[in-house]
């Protein structure tokens, strides 16, 4: 059954056609700069889906005694995952009288408002990778686990990229997360030596993040102990789309993580007039997906 169309008409928006109002406040504040593309690996797909597999390389060389045969190893094939794009759309319908009689010009801002809505949707979809990153109900990686979880390595063993005990952001907990980055292994247990680059926090933690990463001295130590070079080397970013006020995350360089924003069809804005009702219709449509296949290069703490 087709969705019903809510038409904006003169009866519902009397303020916009009356001469009695000197001003009608509208949501016309300057749009904030994008945040998702500061973290996401933005790409595109040219078909109905993306399918990727998993492969583990070789282990370390084995000891060889005199006259003994060489031990042989082989690559190990792992899991696979398929990602398909989702469609997102929103429309606005305005009666011809409303469009013609609007004295404020707000009705003519339909495309601009649809653009804002699309920008907000892009942010929501990408940051859901973090917001839903501790559960498997929303999405999983190629290994079938949540983004922040205890991950089973193809070559044997497990490794966790999250704090098993949720805790507040502090020098101690930040150091522990940096240590997990430092010890991060590949699928055969070989250290990758990936360095964290970006500390991501909600607005409520920006003051703590700035204190930790910008202080010359350890802000949690009264003995003028110098701050650690790795902590001082971190950048921090405030995300306004994190659903938790206490959760925080570390992310490596874009080349070291797999958080993706995948375009299938960029935003398209369309308009038409209904011949019978003379209603003006405006529509925004885009097709995209946000996903991850690999979990490395990110670490999360759900917060206290």
Image: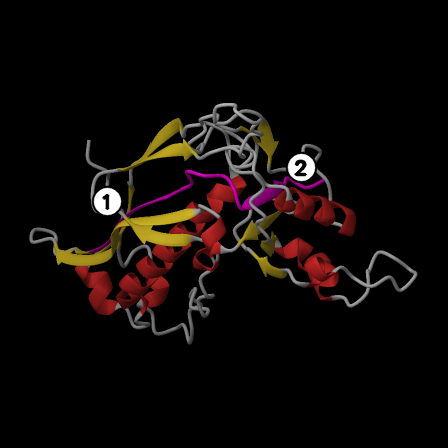
* On-image quarter of the N terminus: top left
Q: Which residue is mark 2?
A: 163
Residues rendered magenta in the picture? 282-304
Q: Which mark is residue 186?
A: none
Q: Can you say whether 38 is above or below 129 in the image?
A: below
Q: Are marks 1 and 2 in contact (CB under 8 Å)?
A: no
Between marks 1 and 2 in the image, the one whose residue lies nearer the viewer: 2
Q: Quadrant of the C terminus?
A: top right
Q: Residue most toward the front? A: 67
In this rendered view, identify the residue nearer to me: 254 or 118: 254
In reply to whether residue 164 is colored magenta, the answer given is no
Name, please, the residue furthest toward the bottom: 22
At horizontal 50% and vertical 27% (from top left) the residue drawn is 155
Q: Position of residue 141 (x, y in %)?
A: 44, 34
Q: Is residue 270 left or right of residue 103?
A: left
Residues packed near mark 2 inside 10 Å, few (<14), some (14 to 19) or many (20 plus)? some
Residue 5 numbered tag: 1
């Amino acid at each position: 059954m087709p969705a019903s169309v809510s038409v904006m008409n003169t009866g519902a928006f009397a303020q916009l056609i009356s001469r009695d109002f000197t001003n009608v406040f509208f949501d016309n504040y300057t749009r904030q700069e994008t945040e998702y593309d500061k973290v996401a690996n933005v790409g595109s797909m040219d078909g109905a889906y993306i399918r990727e597999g998993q492969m583990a390389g070789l282990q370390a060389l084995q000891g060889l005694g005199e006259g003994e045969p060489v031990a042989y190893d082989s690559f190990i094939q792992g899991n696979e995952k398929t990602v398909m794009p989702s469609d997102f759309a929103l429309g606005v319908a305005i009666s011809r009288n409303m469009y013609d009689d609007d004295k404020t010009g707000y009705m003519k801002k339909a495309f601009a408002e649809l653009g804002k809505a699309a920008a907000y949707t892009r942010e929501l979809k990408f940051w859901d990778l973090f917001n839903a990153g501790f559960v498997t109900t929303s999405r999983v990686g190629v290994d079938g686990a949540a983004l922040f979880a205890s991950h089973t390595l193809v070559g044997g063993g497990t490794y966790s990229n999250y704090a098993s005990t949720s805790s507040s952001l502090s020098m101690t907990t930040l150091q522990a997360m940096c240590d997990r980055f430092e010890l991060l292994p590949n699928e055969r247990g070989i250290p990758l030596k990936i360095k964290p680059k970006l500390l991501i926090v909600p607005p409520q933690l920006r003051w703590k993040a700035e204190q930790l990463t910008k202080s010359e001295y350890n802000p949690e130590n009264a003995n003028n102990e110098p701050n650690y070079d790795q902590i001082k080397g971190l950048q921090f970013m405030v995300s306004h789309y994190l659903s938790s006020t206490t959760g925080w995350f570390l992310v490596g360089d874009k080349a070291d993580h797999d958080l993706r924003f995948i375009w299938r069809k960029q935003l398209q804005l369309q308009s038409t007039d209904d011949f019978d009702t003379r209603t003006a219709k405006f529509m925004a449509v885009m097709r995209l997906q946000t996903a991850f296949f690999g979990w490395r290069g990110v670490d999360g703490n759900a917060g206290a």
